Image (cartoon, rainbow, N blue to C red):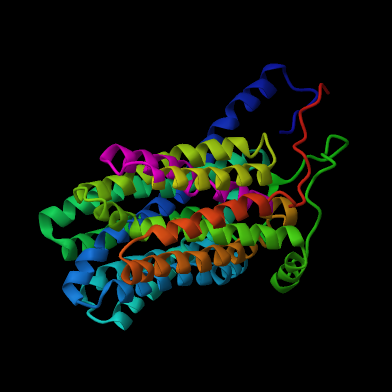
Amino acid sequence: MSQSPGGSGRSPGATTAAAPAPAQIAVWLVLLAAAGTFALTMGTRQTMGLFLSPLNSATGLGLGSISLAFAFGQLWWGLTQPFAGAIADRIGAGRVLLAGVMLVALGTALTPFMTTTSGLVLAIGVLAAGGAGMAGPAVLMAATMRLLPQRMRGMATGIVNAGGSFGQFAMAPIAGALMVGYGWSIAMQVLGAIVLLALPAAFLLRGNGQAAQPASAPPAGPATPAAAVAPRPAGARAALAEAARDPSYRMLAAGFFVCGFHVAFLATHLPGVIATCGLPVQFGAWSLAMLGLFNIVGSVAMGWAVGRWRMKSLLSLVYATRALAVLAFLLAPKTGFTVLAFSAVMGLTFLSTVPPTAGLVAKLFGTTNMAMLFGVVMLSHQIGGFLGAWLGGRMFEATGSYDWVWYIDIMLAVGAALIHLPIREARIARPSAA
């Protein structure tokens, strides 16, 4: 960046032209590492709904008991994220990601050998889900935001989030093909091995919240924006206490609870919902793939939108869209086109809540304790996920239908659309002529 006043006119220009190339490569390496890790861990977790029926047939435990193991996995995935985030903020994301990926692979590979509810809870709910939480969005989003300039953070969170969606889109058909060709047990063990491809990302994403962040620091001098993030408490406990007193943070966590209910219910029970419609089993895998495919579009579009509209308004729009989509699905005839179209619409909103939610946490409290604070919000998400996964199985056992879960889903979506509106967020500053 330094230019000698006495130098030739060409030398500074050559320096300026050559500088962006390595920086651009570094940016894409960071995005590839974070998005690829999320693709492999999220893709594996989101295909587990395909194994619900085979597990039930192999163990004879009943849909309710197996749903409990899946539901505990949703809860444990959320419980691990605040702690994983706090550890990553202190010792670095690389070590946390390394341990997380190894646990996902181990838990997934051990699941076919479990024949009791407690064994399934251990493999699916503790090992695989806990590892996915350690290598989940709280650590990945925070690591990405620390390594990239502030102007790129919105789109970066959308790209990382889309990685999880691509993983679901790619892994669901792979899992379905492996189940048909080799059986469900071998399919799970192969998925566990595939997750290990994420191990190199742990090296690329190393670093912690206390490290210097020159790329994201605002420029010095009179051009510094007035809206730059104010310094926040460095200690995790002080930062969490401050966030807990903020009504906007509490409302954000309440809305994310609803998102968790929606996502877990769909990921765990959508293949079962489609089976009750009398459609072929392939539609279960295709529907999960459609969720992942269209969530790529929704996540990237949301990453683009968070820099142009207020994030709380975007979140309200997403939840209102979910409520209308579920209502339309309940009223429509259950054909193959209907379930795939419904999966596509829900895919657009599936995880597109993550970029604006993570963005609001960073906007309100800065990035120093970002992993821990977003991890707490993710815990709220996964408490909702526990209820969505568990209640789906219990309701079906009790009534022989998923209708009442859909009714609850609609009411929660409407409530989430409304609760985001009072969140304290300044209007987006439009670029001035200067």
Task: Please give the name of the residue rendered at 34% of the width and 67% of the height, measured from the top-left corner.
Answer: 399
The one nearer the camera, 8 or 191, is 191
Task: Please give the name of the residue rendered at 42% of the width and 50% of the height, measured from the top-left corner.
Answer: 164
Residue 153, x across and y down, in percent: 62, 43
Residue 295, x across and y down, in percent: 44, 43
Residue 155, x across and y down, in percent: 57, 39
Query: In screen coordinates, is 174 left or right of 94?
Result: left
Residue 295 visible in the shown view: no
Magenta span of residues: 331-360
Q: For residue 419: magenta?
A: no
The one nearer the camera, 140 or 47, is 47
Residue 342, x across and y down, in percent: 39, 42
Q: Main secondary structure of the magenta part?
A: helix
Location of residue 42 with respect to 99 vertically, above or below: above
Location of residue 135 with respect to 221 vertically, above or below: below
Task: Please give the name of the residue rendered at 75% of the width and 37% of the height, measured from the top-left corner.
Answer: 428
The one nearer the camera, 152 or 318, is 318
